[in-house]
Image: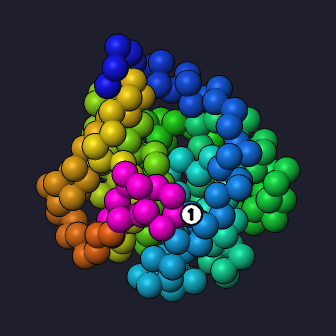
Amino acid sequence: MGDEKKKTLKEIHDYWKLQNHHETYINKVERSEFLTEYVKKYISQKENILEIGCNVGRNLNYLYENNFKQLTGIEISEQAIVELNKTYPLLKDNITIIHSSIENTIKKLPSKHFDLVFTMAVLEHIHPDSEWIFEEMTRITGSYLIIVESEKFEHWRLFPRNYKEVFEKYGLKQVEENHCKEIGLKSYTIRVFKK
């Protein structure tokens, strides 16, 4: 972990509200292609999808272009949403984007409302004080949860966890697990859970 001290929940939120590396997210289309193949395998295009931590919307845009239209994203960074609206104008008018932290939003979402909930490199940043979010994610998931996360790497803003253990504790069953090396995420694992 190095000499850097772990940050508080507020410091983590402040970092993500202000981070400005949006162009690096936009250009990683192969990651969205990879994710979309898993989404297609488990749900139909008519079903309701939520991305937690959608950043500039690259994953949602790729899903939209593949005829998934019932899309919602939650994003803490106002600048990321501004970039989403500029980069993917169709999303701006056709999907729902919630500008908020997941902590301030998830309890307001209805149970089993989303056929699929997914994250990509977001849960690893959830502060230990907010681990209650994982149970809430299980509650709002109607059928499937797909996560692409680093589970071992530590940093001042990364909190490693075994997500199979985390979500199976709340009653989800893991149905698929794979590495993500082919998309340049060597230390990442994709896990698919079924309710």
Magenta stretch: helix, strand or loop mostly: strand
Q: In the rendered image of this protein, does residue 191 appear above or below residue 80?
A: below
Residue 63 location (% of width, % of height):
63, 72
Res 141 quadrant in image:
bottom left
In percent of the image, x 47 and y 35: which residue is there? Answer: 104
Q: Can the viewer see residue 66 in this picture?
A: yes
Which quadrant does the C terminus fall into? bottom left
Residue 169 sits inside the magenta stretch: no
Residue 129 location (% of width, % of height):
30, 27
Residue 188 sits inside the magenta stretch: yes
Snapshot colouring:
rainbow
Q: Can the viewer see residue 111 in this picture?
A: no
Q: In the rendered image of this protein, does residue 53 appear above or below residue 8?
A: below
Label 1 CA crowd tier, 10 Å (few <14, some 14–19, many 20+): many
Disc 1 residue type (three-letter): Arg
Nearer to me, 74 or 140 = 74
Per the image, label 1 sits on a secondary structure element best described as helix
In percent of the image, x 30 and y 58: which residue is there? Answer: 138
- Identify the magenta region: 179-191
Instruction: Give the side of residue 130 with respect to residue 75, left or right.
Output: left
